[in-house]
Amino acid sequence: MLEIPSISHIECPFCCEEIVRPTKAITATCPNCGKTIALDSRVFNQKYVFSGEILTRGNISVGEKGFVKGDLSATDIVIEGIVEGNVKAVGRILLSQSGSLIGNAEARRLVVSEGATLSGNLKIGLKSNKEKNG
Ligand SMILES: [Zn+2]
């Protein structure tokens, strides 16, 4: 199991402004666009089907017994089970050897272990607004 470092700064998913993450809060309001950003991390260890997208600036982990059907957007996403949907991480997507992703992946960094299943389009290495602006 890889350690996920705690996050002190997050990128607003709506306007891409980088904001300081309040400690212990599970939501934050972006000072730039005023929208509410979920910060809670989620772990899926069973079947979970939904329509639309789970959008958080916490981390999402899909365990070996997890099966998620729907779109995910988070800071870091770890997939050890099955995900059918589009996955977007402003940080890293980690697809472990037991992991299976059927859908498109968009992330700054992607780690795919030997034995993993990945079927979809990839967009890797996207820079944040801050990095783009120098
Ligand atoms: Zn914003």
Image (cartoon, rainbow, N blue to C red):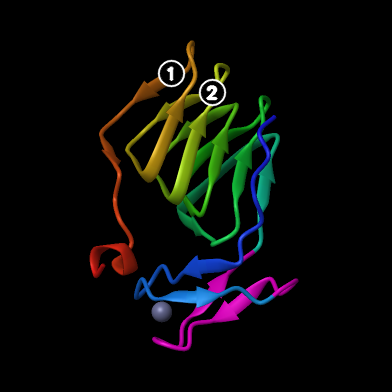
For residue 15: magenta? no
Which residue is located at x 66 percent, y 77 percent?
Answer: 22
| Tag 1 residue | 117
Left or right: where does residue 42 sit relative to residue 57?
A: right
For residue 24: magenta? yes
Q: Quadrant of the N terminus?
A: top right
Q: Is residue 51 visible?
A: yes
Per the picture, the main secondary structure of the magenta-coloured stretch is loop
Disc 2 element:
loop
- Ligand 1 within 8 Å of the CB at mark 2: no
Q: Is residue 54 above or below residue 82?
A: below
Q: Could you say where residue 26 lies in the image, as x and y percent from the top left?
A: 68, 71
Are dots 1 and 2 in contact, CB under 8 Å?
Answer: yes
| Tag 2 residue | 99
Ligand 1 placement by image quarter: bottom left
Of residues 99 and 110, the one drawn nearer to the viewer in this rendering: 110
The furthest residue to the right: 24
- Write down the region rendered in magenta: 23-39
* Amino acid residing under circle 1: Thr
Of residues 53 and 75, the one drawn nearer to the viewer in this rendering: 75
Which residue is located at x 39 percent, y 76 percent?
Answer: 17
Q: Could you say where residue 75 lies in the image, as x and y percent from the top left?
A: 51, 54
* Amino acid residing under circle 2: Gly
Q: Quadrant of residue 120?
A: top left
The alpha-carbon separation of the residues under discs 1 and 2 comes to 6 Å
Q: Could you say where residue 127 lies in the image, as x and y percent from the top left?
A: 30, 55
